[in-house]
Amino acid sequence: MADTLTLKNPVDEDPTPSPPPHNGIDLNIKTIATIILSVVSFPVLISILILGVMFLFPMFFITIGYLVIPLGLLSTVFYSVFISSAPMSILTVGLPLIGFFLSLAFFFSQLNRIRFTAYLFKIVISVMFQYPSGILVSFLSSCVSGFLSLIIFILSSIIYQNRRNIDQADCPHENGGDVCVSNETFLYNIFILFAGYFTFEVVSNVTHAVISGIYGSYFHFGKNGPKYPAYEAFVRAISYSFGSICFGSLLVSLISTLRSLLTIFKEKILDELSRSREGDGDDDDDEVGNRSNSSNSLIFTLIFNILEFLIVEIENCFKIFNKYAFSYVALYGKSYISSAKQTFNFLKYRGLQVLITKSLIESTLTVFSILCSIFSLLGFILMLNFLKFTFNDYPELYIIGGFSQLIIGYFISKITSNSINGGYITLLVCLSMYPDVFKANHPKEFEQLIKFTPSLQQPLNS
């Protein structure tokens, strides 16, 4: 018994209990690298897969994109009738139901234009796969925009701090903790705001011009186009066409700056009215003054909201107009004024087709962004389960990784959307101006398009 038993000294025993065995796997370098690679690669692969499915079934996705709003109206009716306990009314049931049936009626009345949009969407995706440099251009543009955002943020912070120190040194501080802002500082802030708008407009429009050059090469030359269409389009955009791009960007930047100033003035005036209302007393005269201030506040709010709505719509119209104008600039080397005239005639005769095509493609790209983000997240979760991770092992991986999937999925969908938007604008402009060129280079695609829109056979420049 003494030979077989082993006696342990209680003093030598470790009082700390050993940790329970880990049910998952350890985070070594190989596992971390696999997770990081999956986070980056999943959205790319899934976006390519979804674009491939969209290429095979464009009408299906165009229809889904269109039906988002009608189905939203129908869900409102369903909620009001079967779920909500509030009494039904014409606002909650009647108007959404009327909107739903009107949307369906419009869909079937414009079925040929919708089919035209679906086939044009298919052509744009095929060209994007044929010239992947368009996605590369959009990606580099996003990187440049992010870098410029950082630079502008740093410089504006330095200028703001410097001007704040100067203003505080000259401020009398009569009310104790008041903050003084000089007119010179206000002008500095307006210039920084304008410079930011102008910089990003130029980058965005140069990108659009380069993408237009890529799709223009496909339209005019087919398979016999230049070997590096993106490079040649970029050279033209920053040399021959750069002045026109800057001029068009200047107009939009001025409108955007004016919109921001209007918002600032609105908040300042309403804040002054609110302060004056709070400073009044409780006697009868002050009560009359309160009612007067409330009326003035309501009137100013109404006026500024109307002005903001108008200037936002003007800004959006200019941005849309510029996209088509810059396609002319990029493809045919014309000045901005000459391209604007051509764009006006183009929108005059093709306005309804442009509006329908633009709305359908944008709604379809919204569906694409949602699908890309959701399936990227699902793929990441399946990958963690394949590696035998559980939520109790490393919960931060699910949170950080899932959030990263959504961000990267949106980023990739945004890059793809820029390329597709530029492509359909370019092809629509070229088809309207020179249909014979497309017929000579792409006869099968042209025959299919004129089945849905026979008016394309008549060029606008005739």
Image (tube, helix red, strand yellow):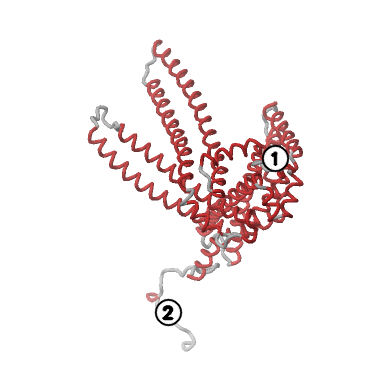
Above or below, 267 against 143 in this view is above
Q: Quadrant of the C terminus?
A: top right
The quarter holding residue 98 reads top right
Which comes before the other along the chain, label 2 or label 1? Answer: 2
Nearer to the camera, 168 or 31: 168
Q: Residue furthest front?
A: 462
Q: CA distance from mark 2 to mark 1?
A: 75 Å
The quarter holding residue 172 reads top left
The quarter holding residue 229 reads bottom right
Q: Position of residue 257 (x, y in %)?
A: 43, 36
According to the picture, the residue beneath numbered tag 1 turns out to be 71
Let me know if residue 195 appears in the view.
Answer: yes
| Element under disc 1 | helix
According to the picture, the residue beneath numbered tag 2 turns out to be 8
Q: Amino acid at mark 1?
A: Leu
Q: Residue furthest top?
A: 284
| Element under disc 2 | loop
Q: Position of residue 372 (x, y in %)?
A: 61, 54
Mark 2 crowd level (few <14, some 14–19, many ≥20, 10 Å Cα): few
- In the picture provided, is 166 more to the left or to the right than 96? left
Nearer to the camera, 399 or 340: 340
- In the picture provided, is 378 more to the left or to the right than 28? right
Above or below, 446 against 228 in this view is above
Does the residue at mark 2 contact the one at mark 1 (Cβ under 8 Å)? no
At horizontal 45% and vertical 15% (from top left) the residue drawn is 291
At horizontal 48% and vertical 26% (from top left) the residue drawn is 304
- In the picture provided, is 325 more to the left or to the right than 350? left
Let me know if residue 50 appears in the view.
Answer: no
Q: Amino acid at mark 2?
A: Lys
Above or below, 284 against 426 in this view is above
Q: Position of residue 120 (x, y in %)?
A: 68, 49
Mark 1 crowd level (few <14, some 14–19, many ≥20, 10 Å Cα): some
